[in-house]
Image (cartoon, helix red, strand yellow):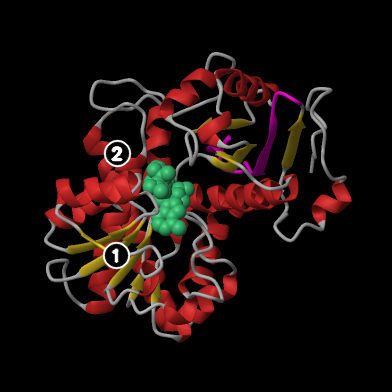
Amino acid sequence: MNSGMNAQHNTVAAKNTMQLKAHPEYDQHEQVVIRDTPELRAIIAIHNSSLGVATGGCRIFPYPSIDEALTDVLRLSRGMTYKSAMAEINFGGGKSVIIADPAREKTESLLLAMGEFIDSLRGCYVAAEDSGTTVADIAVMARRTPHVSGIMSAEQHQGDPSPRTALGVFLGIEEAVRTRLGSSLPGITVGIQGAGNVGLHLARLLKQAGAEVLIADINVQRVESAVETLGLSTCSVDEILSAQVEVLAPCALGAVINPETVSSIRADIVAGGANNQLASEEMGEALHRRGILYVPDYVINAGGIIDIYYQRIGVRDTEKIESHLEIIPHNLAKIFAESVLQDRPTNHIADELARKKFLKPRLQSV
Ligand code: NAD
């Protein structure tokens, strides 16, 4: 465990190693580095690099405190280890967060400072876009470090992983509907929370497949444009989680399944693109007890990291990349079957399968 040991002089660990180890989300992180200077307040967390270099998005969010940023980055970085392991790509798990308001404080100098911070880890962490950052922002960071991904500028691919994240979620929803409802998509209604990059691509794929889509977003303009271009139905942001739909697809925020919301969910299936949908592991148990099929988020939303992986290794073959996405429904079929067999929540089954994959190399080298 290195809480900032190989960082530069202005990189400080906000907590000493003992405090960090006691953090509820610590989970044996390999390295956590904090930069807290007037130019940049940011954290890089590396959870596990058994399978490859820790790779994950750089998020910009106006966290109220460094502690809240730390909690978020630890959870997200751990999720990346599990996601890449399940997707069978040679990436470890890592993530970074910048404490700033992306709408007001995202300046070129902030992004360049983040590029330098990433570079100070000398390739132990590779950043990509995330909530609050765009492909163009990552390209600015790339002026200070080669350790970024997701900025490919091929003609049909601008580096944005969202379309493939959405395609993976779509394949996962198909599998879940087949398993839980014994049917295909026509006639099924999917309620999407969040008309952002992933939500809108997903809505388009679902409509093309004959499903009905109900969409909600705090950004009214996005909803209006989705209704106009895709012919979707809308719902208020307060009602989307409890809407009477077959599938609820959280595609906005984390922790939407929490003690306040879990009993009001009326969908048969929860399957969406957002990271960390469960506020705690127990929420998976609560959904299981209610007979709601929870599709583990890091398994179903792995399309984006698969896309980033192929960008990183310079492969642009659409057929090859999209055939790799088939691992998503394949993994889910295994998880759903085990969940029924063992009468245990899907999130527990998924965690066990992922741990077997990323802990194996380390055990072998002992
Ligand atoms: P985005 O920022 O483009 O879209 C998020 C949307 O959610 C925005 O339109 C926002 O207005 C809306 N929103 C915020 N709060 C809301 C609320 N309370 N109710 C309804 N809508 C709300 O982000 P994105 O790239 O589409 O990603 C969505 C989620 O998927 C995030 O959790 C992200 O971490 C996760 N994810 C994205 C990718 C990817 O490739 N983009 C990959 C894996 C996971």
Q: Which type of secondary structure does the marked residue at label 2 adopt? A: helix
Q: Can residue 115 be spotted in the picture?
A: yes
Magenta stretch contains residue 248: no
Marks 2 and 1, how far apart in space? 34 Å
Residue lying furthest top in this view? 143
Relative horizontal placement of residue 329, taking residue 97 as reference (left or right): left
Determine contact: label 2, label 1, CB under 8 Å.
no
Front residue of 13 and 352: 13
Q: Position of residue 38 (x, y in %)?
A: 75, 25
Image quadrant assignment for residue 163: top left
Q: Can residue 87 be spotted in the picture?
A: no
Q: Residue at x 33, y 76 (%)?
A: 267
Dot 2 beta carbon under 8 Å from ligand 1: no
Q: Is the residue 2 above or below the residue 246 in the image?
A: above
In front of the other: label 2 or label 1?
Answer: 1
Question: Magenta residues: mostly which secondary structure?
Answer: strand
Q: Position of residue 124 (x, y in %)?
A: 64, 30
Name the kind of residue labelled 2 in the image.
Ile
Quarter of the picture containing the N terminus is top right
Image quadrant assignment for residue 36: top right
Front residue of 140 and 315: 140
Q: Which region of the structure is painted magenta?
A: 38-59
Numbered disc total: 2
Label 2 Cα neighbours within 10 Å, binned few <14 / some 14-19 / many ≥20: some
Q: Which residue is mark 1?
A: 235
Relative horizontal placement of residue 349, taking residue 11 as reference (left or right): left
Q: Residue at x 50, y 38 (%)?
A: 132
Q: Residue at x 29, y 65 (%)?
A: 235
**Residue 321, numbered circle:** 2
